[in-house]
Amino acid sequence: MNPLAGRGPYLRGAIIAVAVAVLVSCPMWGGDGVRTTLIVFAYYAALAQMWNLLAGYAGLVTFGHQLFIGLGGYTLAVGAERLGFGVWPSFAAAAVVCGALAVPVGALTFRLRGGYFAVGSWLVAEVFRLAFSSSSYLGNANGMFIRPARSVDPWLVYYIAIGVFIAIVGLVVAMLRSRAGLALMAIRDAEDAAAGLGVHVWRLKLIAFVIAAAGTGLVGALLAVYTPFVQPDAAFSIKWSAEASFMAVVGGIGTVEGPILGTAIYVVLQNELGGRGEIHLIVLGAVSIIVMLLAPGGIAGTLRDRLGWTLFPLGRRPPPRAG
Amino acid sequence: MQLLETLINGSLIGGLYGLIGLGLSINFGTMRVVHLAHGDLIVLASYLFVVALVPAGVPPLVAGLIVVPVMFAAGWLIQRVLVGPSLGRGILPPLIVTFGLSMVLQNLLLLVATADPRTLHSSLASAGVHLGSITISTVRLLDAAAGLACLALLLLLLGRTALGRALRATSDDLDTARLMGIDPRRMYGAAAGIAAATGGVAGMLFAATFTVSPSRGSELLLVAFEVVVVGGLGSLTGTFLGGMLLAIAQLLGAQLFGPNNALLTAHVVVLLVLVFRPQGLMPRTAP
């Protein structure tokens, strides 16, 4: 009946092992072009995964996630360029700064619910964009070059990017398979009912928000190492949230493999449409609408419904009844 | 004296900002959807007005009579085809659909009409009324008058007509309203149409008062959000108080910290309101 029945664990292990082996061995078979594509893929996939943790699991749909891309990038820039802490200590600091700042930002924006939270977090990102644009220490609207990052070996950037991507997927899977993950999904599906069953809704949402902020901060810092340049309009652009939501929705929101599939599609699409920014964004918007209306589960959700199979199983079955 | 002028100008522009927030509030009040393309619909109306109609020789007043019904139809159509089918499955689908629509509208405008800033070129834009040493521009008086007129019309519609009662019933208790023979889809279509029509008026006034470019759609969405949050969610009258506070904050911010920091000052004031008075200035349930 189901061609995949019973072969789940082996097939999953094999797919994941091959994928990791392909990524790790890239220097042996890939050139500069492949490396560039895979770095772009890795940071977008990490970003989409973090956005999906919020929108797909914690019920926090946000269009302000560019806040943490920008803040991560600027933490790296200030640490490496202005303070001379070195590239990699500043890189680690980006996660800490973003995670710490997520606490007051979350405490404030969680006062708004649903769609108003989505716009409220966007407003906070705008505040940072405008404030950083008028700070001469940060280079005003022109931003700043990160000279220490110029000498970093591109293959090291590649391994850090792949490492961040794999670590974020692993962290999300581990979190969702834990008790906290079950509680998060309960919040997403019925917030009041979850609260009634004793779930600490506010605290769990904040934990998810802090994790997503720290992970996205690493993506922003990675981008700053790779470019190596930060500029407020680009770093705090709404484009990041638009892309993250596109990748999560098209791939399949509320699944772990969905954002990865969505990112693969996005990277191909970006290469095809590269030239004109407007057409690129029109396509992103239109495809998001069509998927949301016609196949709201995205690719991964549709595959799960058809095949009854997922790469990262997170569903739970109720315990068998006694007697 | 300068402070008085700022307060007067801020209050007048506040009428326009309140009008910008009105549409967001109507959509949310009836169907609990934050319409993320509202700012871009306003910009679309601006472009219909100052790029398509007025340069073609249509008098501004006649152009207004064309733009408002066209925007009503656009709002109704978007609701029936895109937003309506996304309802009933949680908060995510309508947000993704309206955000996607915002990206499509904004970038279509960029493709068709370029990023050049536009404004209404007419004698109205430079006319002013002198009060002692203070000059008040006629356009800003019109902003406040039109904003308050739209608010009054809307309150009359909601409070005194059969359509208004049906809209309020749909908002308060969907299931009971349905039992009374109200078709929610028609109500949602009407509400979205009315919201877009107020956006049409706002778009024309905005193009007459300031300059407009496609990317300002996002800025206008944030303005709408801010006046709604400051005014108190669900309070249509509060929206206008929120608009005044926002406009005054922008003007004072420009005077105190330079024109580049006008927006930042207003944003920070809104966040402070959210910290200290999260229920807004005039907390109330839907009118």
Image (cartoon, rainbow, N blue to C red):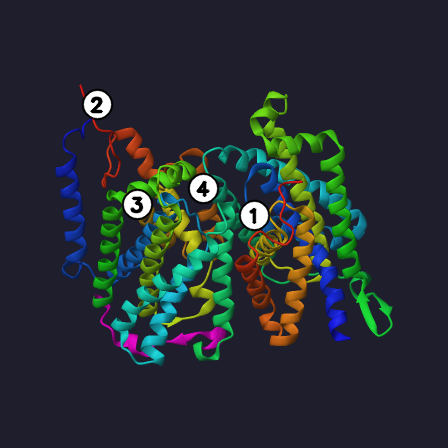
Q: Residue at x 40, y 56 (%)?
A: A274
Query: Can you see residue B48?
Result: no
Which numbered dot is residue A261?
A: 3
Q: Chain of mark 1?
A: B
Same chain for marks 2 and 3? yes
How many angstroms separate mark 3 from mark 4 (CA)?
20 Å
Q: Chain of mark 4?
A: B
How many angstroms separate mark 4 from mark 1 (CA)?
15 Å
Q: What residue is shown with label 1?
A: B37
Under circle 4, the secondary element is: helix
Which numbered dot is residue A321?
A: 2
Highlighted magenta segment, given as a residue range: A139-155
Q: What residue is shown with label 4?
A: B92
**Quadrant of the rendering where the C terminus of chain A is positioned:** top left
Question: For the residue carrying disc 1, how many other residues have a C-alpha within 10 Å: few (<14), some (14-19), or many (20+)?
Answer: many
Q: Nearer the viewer, mark 3 or mark 4?
A: 4
Q: Nearer the viewer, mark 2 or mark 3?
A: 2
